[in-house]
Amino acid sequence: MSNVYDPKSSSYVDRSKRHSNGAAKALLEVMDRKKSNLCVSVDVAQKQSFLTIIDTVGPYVCLIKTHVDIIEDFDDQLLAELKALSERHDFLIFEDRKFADIGNTVKLQYAKGVHKIANWAHIVNAHPVPGPSIVEGLASVGLPLGRGLLLLAEMSTKDNLATGEYTTRAVQMARQRPDFVIGFIAQRRMETIGSHDTSHGEDFLILTPGVGLDVQGDGMGQQYRTPKHVITEAGCDVIIVGRGIYGNGDDVDAIRKQAQRYQADGWKAYLDRLSK
Amino acid sequence: MSNVYDPKSSSYVDRSKRHSNGAAKALLEVMDRKKSNLCVSVDVAQKQSFLTIIDTVGPYVCLIKTHVDIIEDFDDQLLAELKALSERHDFLIFEDRKFADIGNTVKLQYAKGVHKIANWAHIVNAHPVPGPSIVEGLASVGLPLGRGLLLLAEMSTKDNLATGEYTTRAVQMARQRPDFVIGFIAQRRMETIGSHDTSHGEDFLILTPGVGLDVQGDGMGQQYRTPKHVITEAGCDVIIVGRGIYGNGDDVDAIRKQAQRYQADGWKAYLDRLSK
Protein backbone atom coordinates (compact mmCIF):
# COMPACT_ATOMS: atom_id res chain seq x y z
CA MET A 1 0.00 0.00 0.00
CA SER A 2 3.05 2.29 0.25
CA ASN A 3 2.67 3.46 -3.34
CA VAL A 4 -0.94 4.48 -2.88
CA TYR A 5 -1.29 8.22 -2.55
CA ASP A 6 -3.45 9.25 0.41
CA PRO A 7 -4.41 12.91 0.84
CA LYS A 8 -5.12 12.26 4.55
CA SER A 9 -1.45 11.57 5.27
CA SER A 10 -0.03 14.33 3.07
CA SER A 11 0.61 17.90 4.14
CA TYR A 12 -1.47 20.74 2.74
CA VAL A 13 1.61 22.24 1.10
CA ASP A 14 2.59 18.98 -0.61
CA ARG A 15 -0.98 18.59 -1.82
CA SER A 16 -0.98 22.07 -3.35
CA LYS A 17 1.47 20.75 -5.96
CA ARG A 18 -1.00 18.07 -7.09
CA HIS A 19 -3.67 20.59 -8.11
CA SER A 20 -3.63 22.31 -11.50
CA ASN A 21 -6.45 24.70 -10.53
CA GLY A 22 -5.16 28.06 -9.30
CA ALA A 23 -7.78 28.51 -6.59
CA ALA A 24 -7.07 25.05 -5.12
CA LYS A 25 -3.32 25.71 -5.11
CA ALA A 26 -3.78 29.12 -3.52
CA LEU A 27 -6.05 27.79 -0.79
CA LEU A 28 -3.71 24.95 0.21
CA GLU A 29 -0.77 27.36 0.23
CA VAL A 30 -2.50 29.88 2.46
CA MET A 31 -3.57 27.07 4.81
CA ASP A 32 0.08 26.09 5.21
CA ARG A 33 1.34 29.68 5.44
CA LYS A 34 -1.17 30.75 8.11
CA LYS A 35 -1.45 27.39 9.87
CA SER A 36 -5.19 27.55 9.53
CA ASN A 37 -7.81 25.20 8.13
CA LEU A 38 -10.56 27.46 9.45
CA CYS A 39 -13.20 28.94 7.16
CA VAL A 40 -15.57 31.39 8.84
CA SER A 41 -19.07 31.56 7.41
CA VAL A 42 -20.32 35.14 7.74
CA ASP A 43 -24.12 35.03 7.57
CA VAL A 44 -25.23 38.50 8.58
CA ALA A 45 -27.59 40.90 6.85
CA GLN A 46 -25.82 44.25 7.45
CA LYS A 47 -22.72 45.42 5.59
CA GLN A 48 -20.99 46.96 8.59
CA SER A 49 -21.45 43.86 10.72
CA PHE A 50 -20.27 41.69 7.79
CA LEU A 51 -17.07 43.72 7.33
CA THR A 52 -16.40 43.98 11.08
CA ILE A 53 -16.59 40.23 11.55
CA ILE A 54 -14.32 39.58 8.55
CA ASP A 55 -11.77 42.16 9.67
CA THR A 56 -11.75 40.54 13.13
CA VAL A 57 -11.42 36.89 12.10
CA GLY A 58 -9.32 37.58 8.98
CA PRO A 59 -5.89 36.90 10.55
CA TYR A 60 -6.99 33.43 11.71
CA VAL A 61 -8.70 32.01 8.64
CA CYS A 62 -7.70 30.53 5.29
CA LEU A 63 -11.09 31.26 3.78
CA ILE A 64 -14.15 33.47 4.32
CA LYS A 65 -17.48 32.02 3.28
CA THR A 66 -20.09 34.56 2.24
CA HIS A 67 -23.79 34.76 1.39
CA VAL A 68 -23.81 38.19 -0.23
CA ASP A 69 -27.43 37.70 -1.26
CA ILE A 70 -28.61 38.15 2.34
CA ILE A 71 -26.93 41.56 2.82
CA GLU A 72 -29.58 44.26 2.70
CA ASP A 73 -27.27 47.22 2.08
CA PHE A 74 -25.02 45.36 -0.36
CA ASP A 75 -23.22 47.63 -2.83
CA ASP A 76 -20.06 47.80 -4.92
CA GLN A 77 -18.19 49.45 -2.06
CA LEU A 78 -18.77 46.34 0.07
CA LEU A 79 -17.07 44.26 -2.62
CA ALA A 80 -14.13 46.66 -2.76
CA GLU A 81 -13.71 46.44 1.02
CA LEU A 82 -14.07 42.66 1.00
CA LYS A 83 -11.32 42.38 -1.63
CA ALA A 84 -9.08 44.73 0.37
CA LEU A 85 -9.59 42.64 3.54
CA SER A 86 -8.80 39.49 1.57
CA GLU A 87 -5.44 40.96 0.53
CA ARG A 88 -4.61 42.55 3.89
CA HIS A 89 -5.32 39.41 5.94
CA ASP A 90 -4.34 36.85 3.27
CA PHE A 91 -7.45 34.73 2.86
CA LEU A 92 -9.53 33.50 -0.07
CA ILE A 93 -13.24 34.17 -0.60
CA PHE A 94 -15.84 31.45 -1.06
CA GLU A 95 -19.33 32.60 -2.05
CA ASP A 96 -21.64 29.87 -0.81
CA ARG A 97 -24.10 30.40 -3.66
CA LYS A 98 -25.11 26.75 -4.06
CA PHE A 99 -25.78 27.15 -7.78
CA ALA A 100 -28.48 24.65 -8.73
CA ASP A 101 -29.88 25.58 -12.13
CA ILE A 102 -29.33 24.63 -15.76
CA GLY A 103 -26.08 25.55 -17.51
CA ASN A 104 -27.32 28.63 -19.31
CA THR A 105 -28.87 30.12 -16.15
CA VAL A 106 -25.94 29.51 -13.82
CA LYS A 107 -23.61 31.20 -16.31
CA LEU A 108 -25.70 34.36 -15.93
CA GLN A 109 -26.07 34.00 -12.15
CA TYR A 110 -22.31 33.55 -11.78
CA ALA A 111 -21.22 36.41 -14.06
CA LYS A 112 -24.03 38.94 -13.89
CA GLY A 113 -26.64 40.50 -11.63
CA VAL A 114 -25.78 43.04 -8.95
CA HIS A 115 -23.49 40.56 -7.21
CA LYS A 116 -21.17 39.66 -10.14
CA ILE A 117 -19.86 36.72 -8.12
CA ALA A 118 -17.24 35.56 -10.62
CA ASN A 119 -15.47 38.91 -10.31
CA TRP A 120 -14.46 38.46 -6.68
CA ALA A 121 -15.16 34.93 -5.34
CA HIS A 122 -12.14 32.63 -5.72
CA ILE A 123 -14.36 29.63 -4.99
CA VAL A 124 -18.07 28.93 -5.42
CA ASN A 125 -20.14 25.81 -4.97
CA ALA A 126 -22.93 24.04 -6.81
CA HIS A 127 -25.38 21.22 -6.29
CA PRO A 128 -24.81 18.36 -8.74
CA VAL A 129 -28.56 17.73 -9.12
CA PRO A 130 -28.91 19.35 -12.59
CA GLY A 131 -26.25 16.99 -13.99
CA PRO A 132 -22.95 17.79 -15.75
CA SER A 133 -24.33 20.83 -17.59
CA ILE A 134 -24.15 22.90 -14.40
CA VAL A 135 -20.39 22.30 -14.20
CA GLU A 136 -19.94 23.15 -17.87
CA GLY A 137 -21.94 26.38 -17.52
CA LEU A 138 -19.97 27.53 -14.48
CA ALA A 139 -16.61 26.45 -15.96
CA SER A 140 -17.24 28.58 -19.05
CA VAL A 141 -17.29 31.65 -16.77
CA GLY A 142 -14.95 30.64 -13.94
CA LEU A 143 -12.04 28.86 -15.60
CA PRO A 144 -10.80 31.87 -17.61
CA LEU A 145 -10.70 33.77 -14.29
CA GLY A 146 -8.79 31.03 -12.45
CA ARG A 147 -11.73 30.19 -10.19
CA GLY A 148 -12.53 26.85 -8.56
CA LEU A 149 -15.78 24.97 -7.94
CA LEU A 150 -16.85 22.74 -5.06
CA LEU A 151 -19.71 20.30 -5.52
CA LEU A 152 -22.16 19.52 -2.72
CA ALA A 153 -21.74 15.76 -2.56
CA GLU A 154 -23.30 15.54 0.91
CA MET A 155 -25.16 17.85 3.28
CA SER A 156 -25.17 18.09 7.08
CA THR A 157 -28.91 18.61 7.55
CA LYS A 158 -31.33 16.04 8.93
CA ASP A 159 -32.96 13.72 6.38
CA ASN A 160 -31.16 15.32 3.42
CA LEU A 161 -31.20 13.60 0.02
CA ALA A 162 -27.48 13.90 -0.85
CA THR A 163 -26.67 10.30 -0.02
CA GLY A 164 -25.84 7.00 -1.70
CA GLU A 165 -26.02 7.06 -5.49
CA TYR A 166 -26.48 10.85 -5.44
CA THR A 167 -23.10 11.26 -3.72
CA THR A 168 -21.45 8.78 -6.07
CA ARG A 169 -22.67 10.63 -9.14
CA ALA A 170 -21.50 13.94 -7.70
CA VAL A 171 -18.00 12.50 -7.42
CA GLN A 172 -18.16 11.15 -10.96
CA MET A 173 -19.15 14.61 -12.22
CA ALA A 174 -16.13 16.08 -10.43
CA ARG A 175 -13.80 13.54 -12.07
CA GLN A 176 -14.94 14.73 -15.49
CA ARG A 177 -13.65 18.27 -14.82
CA PRO A 178 -10.58 18.10 -12.53
CA ASP A 179 -9.37 21.40 -13.99
CA PHE A 180 -12.33 23.24 -12.42
CA VAL A 181 -13.94 21.06 -9.73
CA ILE A 182 -11.44 21.25 -6.88
CA GLY A 183 -13.34 19.32 -4.25
CA PHE A 184 -16.51 18.95 -2.26
CA ILE A 185 -18.68 20.21 0.49
CA ALA A 186 -18.88 16.90 2.35
CA GLN A 187 -18.52 15.12 5.67
CA ARG A 188 -15.72 12.68 4.68
CA ARG A 189 -13.11 12.03 1.98
CA MET A 190 -14.44 11.32 -1.49
CA GLU A 191 -11.53 9.77 -3.45
CA THR A 192 -12.74 6.19 -2.99
CA ILE A 193 -16.40 6.94 -3.82
CA GLY A 194 -17.50 5.27 -7.05
CA SER A 195 -13.95 4.20 -7.88
CA HIS A 196 -12.02 0.96 -7.51
CA ASP A 197 -8.71 2.61 -8.27
CA THR A 198 -7.20 4.63 -5.45
CA SER A 199 -3.67 4.69 -6.83
CA HIS A 200 -4.00 7.41 -9.47
CA GLY A 201 -3.22 10.23 -7.08
CA GLU A 202 -6.62 11.87 -6.93
CA ASP A 203 -6.82 14.71 -4.42
CA PHE A 204 -10.04 16.55 -3.58
CA LEU A 205 -10.39 19.42 -1.15
CA ILE A 206 -13.05 18.53 1.42
CA LEU A 207 -14.71 21.50 3.11
CA THR A 208 -17.03 20.59 5.95
CA PRO A 209 -19.86 22.69 7.39
CA GLY A 210 -21.76 21.92 10.55
CA VAL A 211 -18.68 22.24 12.80
CA GLY A 212 -19.14 23.46 16.35
CA LEU A 213 -17.35 23.10 19.70
CA ASP A 214 -20.22 24.09 21.96
CA VAL A 215 -23.56 23.24 20.33
CA GLN A 216 -25.41 20.19 19.07
CA GLY A 217 -28.01 21.70 16.73
CA ASP A 218 -29.82 24.89 15.80
CA GLY A 219 -33.39 23.63 15.96
CA MET A 220 -33.72 24.01 12.17
CA GLY A 221 -32.17 20.75 11.03
CA GLN A 222 -28.48 21.69 11.25
CA GLN A 223 -26.33 19.12 13.07
CA TYR A 224 -22.83 19.79 14.47
CA ARG A 225 -19.52 17.87 14.76
CA THR A 226 -16.19 18.90 16.34
CA PRO A 227 -12.91 19.63 14.47
CA LYS A 228 -11.51 16.33 15.85
CA HIS A 229 -14.39 14.40 14.27
CA VAL A 230 -14.11 16.26 11.01
CA ILE A 231 -10.35 16.69 10.44
CA THR A 232 -8.62 13.92 12.41
CA GLU A 233 -11.16 11.14 12.13
CA ALA A 234 -13.06 11.83 8.89
CA GLY A 235 -10.02 13.29 7.10
CA CYS A 236 -11.70 16.45 5.84
CA ASP A 237 -9.56 19.50 5.06
CA VAL A 238 -11.34 22.72 6.01
CA ILE A 239 -13.74 23.32 8.91
CA ILE A 240 -16.54 25.77 8.22
CA VAL A 241 -17.75 27.55 11.36
CA GLY A 242 -20.42 30.22 11.50
CA ARG A 243 -22.56 31.13 14.48
CA GLY A 244 -20.12 29.29 16.80
CA ILE A 245 -17.72 32.20 16.24
CA TYR A 246 -19.88 35.34 16.08
CA GLY A 247 -23.13 34.05 17.56
CA ASN A 248 -22.95 36.46 20.48
CA GLY A 249 -23.18 39.66 18.45
CA ASP A 250 -20.46 42.03 17.33
CA ASP A 251 -18.21 42.05 20.40
CA VAL A 252 -14.92 41.89 18.51
CA ASP A 253 -12.90 40.55 21.44
CA ALA A 254 -15.26 37.60 21.86
CA ILE A 255 -15.26 36.95 18.11
CA ARG A 256 -11.44 37.12 17.95
CA LYS A 257 -11.10 34.64 20.84
CA GLN A 258 -13.49 32.19 19.21
CA ALA A 259 -11.67 32.44 15.87
CA GLN A 260 -8.31 31.81 17.60
CA ARG A 261 -9.84 28.87 19.46
CA TYR A 262 -11.23 27.23 16.32
CA GLN A 263 -8.03 27.92 14.38
CA ALA A 264 -5.94 26.25 17.11
CA ASP A 265 -8.35 23.34 17.47
CA GLY A 266 -8.58 22.75 13.71
CA TRP A 267 -4.82 22.93 13.23
CA LYS A 268 -4.17 20.54 16.13
CA ALA A 269 -6.66 18.11 14.59
CA TYR A 270 -4.67 18.31 11.31
CA LEU A 271 -1.31 17.74 13.02
CA ASP A 272 -2.82 14.80 14.92
CA ARG A 273 -3.95 13.34 11.60
CA LEU A 274 -0.48 13.71 10.03
CA SER A 275 1.21 12.04 13.01
CA LYS A 276 -1.10 9.04 12.93
CA MET B 1 -62.66 4.31 -10.13
CA SER B 2 -65.35 7.00 -10.41
CA ASN B 3 -64.84 8.13 -6.83
CA VAL B 4 -61.12 8.66 -7.31
CA TYR B 5 -60.27 12.33 -7.69
CA ASP B 6 -57.98 12.98 -10.66
CA PRO B 7 -56.53 16.46 -11.16
CA LYS B 8 -55.94 15.63 -14.85
CA SER B 9 -59.68 15.46 -15.57
CA SER B 10 -60.68 18.44 -13.41
CA SER B 11 -60.81 22.04 -14.56
CA TYR B 12 -58.36 24.59 -13.22
CA VAL B 13 -61.20 26.54 -11.62
CA ASP B 14 -62.61 23.49 -9.84
CA ARG B 15 -59.15 22.63 -8.65
CA SER B 16 -58.65 26.11 -7.18
CA LYS B 17 -61.24 25.19 -4.54
CA ARG B 18 -59.17 22.22 -3.36
CA HIS B 19 -56.18 24.37 -2.39
CA SER B 20 -55.95 26.14 0.96
CA ASN B 21 -52.85 28.09 -0.06
CA GLY B 22 -53.67 31.55 -1.36
CA ALA B 23 -51.01 31.59 -4.09
CA ALA B 24 -52.21 28.24 -5.49
CA LYS B 25 -55.83 29.41 -5.50
CA ALA B 26 -54.90 32.70 -7.16
CA LEU B 27 -52.84 30.99 -9.87
CA LEU B 28 -55.55 28.50 -10.80
CA GLU B 29 -58.13 31.29 -10.87
CA VAL B 30 -56.05 33.49 -13.15
CA MET B 31 -55.40 30.51 -15.45
CA ASP B 32 -59.16 30.05 -15.82
CA ARG B 33 -59.88 33.78 -16.14
CA LYS B 34 -57.26 34.42 -18.84
CA LYS B 35 -57.45 31.01 -20.51
CA SER B 36 -53.72 30.66 -20.17
CA ASN B 37 -51.45 28.00 -18.73
CA LEU B 38 -48.42 29.82 -20.09
CA CYS B 39 -45.60 30.96 -17.84
CA VAL B 40 -42.92 33.01 -19.56
CA SER B 41 -39.44 32.72 -18.13
CA VAL B 42 -37.68 36.08 -18.52
CA ASP B 43 -33.95 35.45 -18.35
CA VAL B 44 -32.35 38.70 -19.45
CA ALA B 45 -29.68 40.79 -17.77
CA GLN B 46 -30.96 44.34 -18.45
CA LYS B 47 -33.85 45.97 -16.61
CA GLN B 48 -35.37 47.68 -19.64
CA SER B 49 -35.35 44.50 -21.70
CA PHE B 50 -36.82 42.58 -18.73
CA LEU B 51 -39.70 45.03 -18.32
CA THR B 52 -40.35 45.31 -22.07
CA ILE B 53 -40.69 41.56 -22.46
CA ILE B 54 -43.01 41.30 -19.45
CA ASP B 55 -45.18 44.19 -20.62
CA THR B 56 -45.43 42.52 -24.05
CA VAL B 57 -46.27 38.97 -22.94
CA GLY B 58 -48.26 40.03 -19.84
CA PRO B 59 -51.75 39.78 -21.39
CA TYR B 60 -51.13 36.18 -22.48
CA VAL B 61 -49.63 34.60 -19.37
CA CYS B 62 -50.82 33.35 -15.99
CA LEU B 63 -47.35 33.62 -14.50
CA ILE B 64 -44.03 35.37 -15.09
CA LYS B 65 -40.92 33.49 -14.02
CA THR B 66 -37.98 35.66 -13.02
CA HIS B 67 -34.29 35.36 -12.18
CA VAL B 68 -33.78 38.79 -10.63
CA ASP B 69 -30.27 37.81 -9.59
CA ILE B 70 -29.04 38.02 -13.20
CA ILE B 71 -30.23 41.61 -13.75
CA GLU B 72 -27.22 43.91 -13.70
CA ASP B 73 -29.09 47.20 -13.15
CA PHE B 74 -31.58 45.72 -10.66
CA ASP B 75 -33.02 48.27 -8.23
CA ASP B 76 -36.13 48.93 -6.15
CA GLN B 77 -37.76 50.76 -9.05
CA LEU B 78 -37.63 47.56 -11.11
CA LEU B 79 -39.59 45.79 -8.36
CA ALA B 80 -42.18 48.59 -8.28
CA GLU B 81 -42.62 48.34 -12.06
CA LEU B 82 -42.79 44.56 -11.96
CA LYS B 83 -45.55 44.72 -9.33
CA ALA B 84 -47.45 47.32 -11.37
CA LEU B 85 -47.25 45.11 -14.50
CA SER B 86 -48.46 42.14 -12.46
CA GLU B 87 -51.56 44.09 -11.46
CA ARG B 88 -52.18 45.71 -14.86
CA HIS B 89 -51.92 42.46 -16.84
CA ASP B 90 -53.26 40.13 -14.12
CA PHE B 91 -50.48 37.59 -13.66
CA LEU B 92 -48.59 36.15 -10.70
CA ILE B 93 -44.82 36.30 -10.20
CA PHE B 94 -42.62 33.25 -9.68
CA GLU B 95 -39.01 33.91 -8.71
CA ASP B 96 -37.10 30.85 -9.88
CA ARG B 97 -34.59 31.10 -7.05
CA LYS B 98 -34.10 27.36 -6.57
CA PHE B 99 -33.36 27.74 -2.87
CA ALA B 100 -31.05 24.91 -1.86
CA ASP B 101 -29.53 25.70 1.53
CA ILE B 102 -30.20 24.91 5.17
CA GLY B 103 -33.30 26.31 6.89
CA ASN B 104 -31.63 29.22 8.65
CA THR B 105 -29.89 30.42 5.47
CA VAL B 106 -32.89 30.18 3.13
CA LYS B 107 -34.93 32.24 5.59
CA LEU B 108 -32.43 35.04 5.15
CA GLN B 109 -32.11 34.57 1.38
CA TYR B 110 -35.90 34.66 1.00
CA ALA B 111 -36.59 37.69 3.21
CA LYS B 112 -33.44 39.80 3.02
CA GLY B 113 -30.65 40.94 0.72
CA VAL B 114 -31.15 43.50 -2.00
CA HIS B 115 -33.76 41.31 -3.70
CA LYS B 116 -36.20 40.82 -0.74
CA ILE B 117 -37.89 38.05 -2.72
CA ALA B 118 -40.64 37.32 -0.20
CA ASN B 119 -41.92 40.89 -0.59
CA TRP B 120 -42.99 40.51 -4.20
CA ALA B 121 -42.79 36.88 -5.46
CA HIS B 122 -46.10 35.04 -5.04
CA ILE B 123 -44.34 31.75 -5.70
CA VAL B 124 -40.76 30.54 -5.26
CA ASN B 125 -39.14 27.15 -5.64
CA ALA B 126 -36.62 25.04 -3.76
CA HIS B 127 -34.60 21.89 -4.22
CA PRO B 128 -35.55 19.20 -1.70
CA VAL B 129 -31.94 18.04 -1.33
CA PRO B 130 -31.35 19.67 2.12
CA GLY B 131 -34.32 17.75 3.57
CA PRO B 132 -37.48 19.03 5.29
CA SER B 133 -35.68 21.89 7.08
CA ILE B 134 -35.58 23.90 3.85
CA VAL B 135 -39.37 23.84 3.66
CA GLU B 136 -39.71 24.81 7.33
CA GLY B 137 -37.28 27.71 6.90
CA LEU B 138 -39.06 29.07 3.83
CA ALA B 139 -42.54 28.52 5.33
CA SER B 140 -41.61 30.60 8.38
CA VAL B 141 -41.14 33.58 6.04
CA GLY B 142 -43.60 32.85 3.23
CA LEU B 143 -46.73 31.53 4.92
CA PRO B 144 -47.53 34.71 6.87
CA LEU B 145 -47.36 36.55 3.51
CA GLY B 146 -49.65 34.07 1.73
CA ARG B 147 -46.84 32.78 -0.52
CA GLY B 148 -46.53 29.32 -2.08
CA LEU B 149 -43.58 26.99 -2.65
CA LEU B 150 -42.82 24.58 -5.48
CA LEU B 151 -40.33 21.77 -4.96
CA LEU B 152 -38.03 20.59 -7.73
CA ALA B 153 -38.98 16.92 -7.84
CA GLU B 154 -37.49 16.43 -11.29
CA MET B 155 -35.32 18.38 -13.71
CA SER B 156 -35.29 18.56 -17.51
CA THR B 157 -31.52 18.54 -17.99
CA LYS B 158 -29.51 15.64 -19.32
CA ASP B 159 -28.19 13.15 -16.72
CA ASN B 160 -29.74 15.05 -13.80
CA LEU B 161 -29.93 13.42 -10.35
CA ALA B 162 -33.56 14.24 -9.49
CA THR B 163 -34.87 10.77 -10.25
CA GLY B 164 -36.16 7.67 -8.50
CA GLU B 165 -35.95 7.77 -4.72
CA TYR B 166 -34.97 11.44 -4.84
CA THR B 167 -38.26 12.30 -6.57
CA THR B 168 -40.24 10.13 -4.17
CA ARG B 169 -38.76 11.85 -1.14
CA ALA B 170 -39.46 15.26 -2.66
CA VAL B 171 -43.15 14.33 -2.91
CA GLN B 172 -43.15 13.04 0.67
CA MET B 173 -41.68 16.36 1.85
CA ALA B 174 -44.48 18.20 0.03
CA ARG B 175 -47.14 16.06 1.71
CA GLN B 176 -45.82 17.14 5.12
CA ARG B 177 -46.62 20.81 4.36
CA PRO B 178 -49.69 21.03 2.08
CA ASP B 179 -50.42 24.50 3.46
CA PHE B 180 -47.24 25.86 1.87
CA VAL B 181 -45.96 23.41 -0.78
CA ILE B 182 -48.41 23.90 -3.64
CA GLY B 183 -46.80 21.66 -6.22
CA PHE B 184 -43.71 20.81 -8.20
CA ILE B 185 -41.39 21.70 -10.98
CA ALA B 186 -41.67 18.35 -12.76
CA GLN B 187 -42.29 16.56 -16.06
CA ARG B 188 -45.41 14.57 -15.01
CA ARG B 189 -48.07 14.36 -12.29
CA MET B 190 -46.84 13.53 -8.81
CA GLU B 191 -49.92 12.45 -6.80
CA THR B 192 -49.23 8.74 -7.20
CA ILE B 193 -45.51 8.97 -6.38
CA GLY B 194 -44.64 7.23 -3.12
CA SER B 195 -48.29 6.67 -2.25
CA HIS B 196 -50.65 3.72 -2.53
CA ASP B 197 -53.68 5.87 -1.82
CA THR B 198 -54.87 8.03 -4.71
CA SER B 199 -58.38 8.60 -3.36
CA HIS B 200 -57.69 11.27 -0.79
CA GLY B 201 -58.08 14.16 -3.19
CA GLU B 202 -54.49 15.29 -3.39
CA ASP B 203 -53.89 18.04 -5.95
CA PHE B 204 -50.46 19.37 -6.84
CA LEU B 205 -49.69 22.11 -9.32
CA ILE B 206 -47.20 20.80 -11.87
CA LEU B 207 -45.13 23.47 -13.62
CA THR B 208 -42.98 22.18 -16.44
CA PRO B 209 -39.89 23.82 -17.93
CA GLY B 210 -38.13 22.72 -21.06
CA VAL B 211 -41.14 23.42 -23.31
CA GLY B 212 -40.54 24.50 -26.90
CA LEU B 213 -42.34 24.33 -30.23
CA ASP B 214 -39.37 24.85 -32.51
CA VAL B 215 -36.19 23.59 -30.86
CA GLN B 216 -34.76 20.34 -29.54
CA GLY B 217 -31.98 21.49 -27.24
CA ASP B 218 -29.74 24.44 -26.37
CA GLY B 219 -26.38 22.67 -26.49
CA MET B 220 -25.99 23.09 -22.71
CA GLY B 221 -27.97 20.11 -21.47
CA GLN B 222 -31.51 21.56 -21.72
CA GLN B 223 -34.00 19.27 -23.50
CA TYR B 224 -37.39 20.40 -24.91
CA ARG B 225 -40.93 18.96 -25.19
CA THR B 226 -44.08 20.40 -26.79
CA PRO B 227 -47.24 21.62 -24.94
CA LYS B 228 -49.07 18.53 -26.23
CA HIS B 229 -46.50 16.24 -24.63
CA VAL B 230 -46.50 18.19 -21.40
CA ILE B 231 -50.17 19.16 -20.85
CA THR B 232 -52.28 16.62 -22.74
CA GLU B 233 -50.15 13.52 -22.40
CA ALA B 234 -48.16 14.00 -19.19
CA GLY B 235 -50.96 15.91 -17.44
CA CYS B 236 -48.84 18.84 -16.25
CA ASP B 237 -50.53 22.18 -15.53
CA VAL B 238 -48.31 25.09 -16.55
CA ILE B 239 -45.86 25.27 -19.46
CA ILE B 240 -42.75 27.32 -18.82
CA VAL B 241 -41.31 28.85 -21.99
CA GLY B 242 -38.29 31.11 -22.19
CA ARG B 243 -36.08 31.68 -25.19
CA GLY B 244 -38.75 30.14 -27.45
CA ILE B 245 -40.70 33.37 -26.97
CA TYR B 246 -38.13 36.18 -26.87
CA GLY B 247 -35.09 34.41 -28.31
CA ASN B 248 -34.95 36.74 -31.29
CA GLY B 249 -34.26 39.91 -29.36
CA ASP B 250 -36.60 42.67 -28.27
CA ASP B 251 -38.86 42.94 -31.35
CA VAL B 252 -42.11 43.29 -29.44
CA ASP B 253 -44.32 42.18 -32.34
CA ALA B 254 -42.41 38.92 -32.71
CA ILE B 255 -42.49 38.37 -28.95
CA ARG B 256 -46.22 39.06 -28.79
CA LYS B 257 -46.92 36.61 -31.62
CA GLN B 258 -44.90 33.87 -29.94
CA ALA B 259 -46.67 34.45 -26.61
CA GLN B 260 -50.08 34.25 -28.32
CA ARG B 261 -48.99 31.10 -30.12
CA TYR B 262 -47.82 29.35 -26.95
CA GLN B 263 -50.89 30.52 -25.02
CA ALA B 264 -53.21 29.09 -27.71
CA ASP B 265 -51.23 25.88 -28.02
CA GLY B 266 -51.08 25.35 -24.25
CA TRP B 267 -54.79 26.05 -23.78
CA LYS B 268 -55.76 23.72 -26.62
CA ALA B 269 -53.63 21.01 -25.02
CA TYR B 270 -55.54 21.55 -21.74
CA LEU B 271 -58.98 21.41 -23.44
CA ASP B 272 -57.89 18.25 -25.29
CA ARG B 273 -56.99 16.72 -21.93
CA LEU B 274 -60.34 17.60 -20.36
CA SER B 275 -62.26 16.12 -23.31
CA LYS B 276 -60.42 12.82 -23.15
Image: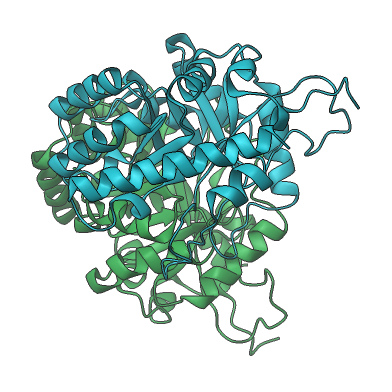
Chain colours: A cyan, B green
Q: Quadrant location of residue B28?
A: bottom left
In percent of width and height, residue B112 lies at 22, 51
Query: Which residue is drawn at the image coordinates 22% and 20% (left, top)?
Result: A84
Number of numbered discs = 0
Residue ranking furthest to the right: A1
Query: Which residue is drawn at the image coordinates 68% and 47% (left, top)?
Result: A233
**Left or right, residue A135 beside residue B256:** right
Residue ranking furthest to the bottom: B3
Q: Quadrant location of residue A184?
A: top right
In percent of width and height, residue A149 lies at 52, 27
Query: Which residue is drawn at the image coordinates 60% and 65% (left, top)?
Result: A159
> Considering the image in quadrants, where does the C terminus of chain B appear?
bottom right
Q: Nearer the viewer, residue A126 or B170?
A: A126
Task: Determine whether A70 is above or below B139 in the image.
Answer: above
Q: Nearer the viewer, residue A271 or B21?
A: A271
Task: Determine whether A78 is above or below B275 in the image.
Answer: above
Q: Is residue B55 visible?
A: no
Q: Nearer the viewer, residue B242 or A234?
A: A234
In percent of width and height, residue B173 lies at 55, 69
In percent of width and height, residue B11 lies at 46, 72
**Left or right, residue A3 beside residue A111:** right
Q: Nearer the viewer, residue A196 or B39?
A: A196
**Left or right, residue B121 beside residue A274:** left
Query: Which residue is drawn at the image coordinates 26% and 36% (left, top)?
Result: A54
> Considering the image in quadrants, where does the N terminus of chain B appear?
bottom right
Q: Is residue B25 visible?
A: yes
**Left or right, residue B138 beside residue A102:** left
